[in-house]
Amino acid sequence: MLALTSDVLTYCNGDGIKSQHQWTELMEQLDAWENGTNSTFTPFYQESENLEAGRCWPGIWFANDCHGSYSS
């Protein structure tokens, strides 16, 4: 996912010619990634951004065993 995010940021902010074909290819890669992931990548809570409340980004919460476990 990080590599795909990098590709999207490069497409959006990088120099060079941008095409609909390149964008479509990026979206197909995203769809393939989403379809290939397991349920731990499905958020259990989502809220939209709210500029009036000072939230510029949506809130998305994920649950995964590794987030709550630790070793003593």
Image (spheres, helix red, strand yellow):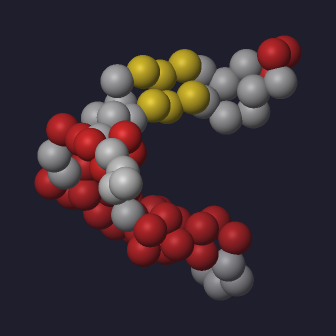
Q: Extreme front residue here? A: 72
Q: Residue at x 57, y 29 (%)?
A: 59
| Most foreground residue, 31 or 70 | 70
Q: Is residue 70 above or below residue 23?
A: above
Q: Is residue 59 above or below residue 6?
A: above
Percent position of residue 51, x then y: 80, 22
Q: Quadrant of residue 43?
A: top left
| Most foreground residue, 3 or 9 | 3
User: The N terminus appears in which quarter of the rendering?
Assistant: bottom left
Q: Extreme bottom residue here? A: 16
Q: Residue at x 21, y 57 (%)?
A: 32
Q: Residue at x 42, y 21 (%)?
A: 45
Q: Residue at x 19, y 51 (%)?
A: 37
| Most foreground residue, 48 or 69 | 69
Percent position of residue 64, x then y: 29, 41
| Most foreground residue, 26 or 40 | 40
Percent position of residue 19, x then y: 51, 70
Q: Quadrant of residue 67?
A: top left
Total number of numbered discs in the rendering: 0
Percent position of residue 62, x then y: 38, 35
51 left or right of 23 in image: right
User: The C terminus appears in which quarter of the rendering?
Assistant: bottom left
Q: Is residue 19 above or below residue 14?
A: above
Would you say residue 49 is visible in this rendering? yes
Q: Is residue 35 above or below residue 24?
A: above
8 left or right of 25 in image: right
Would you say residue 28 is visible in this rendering? no
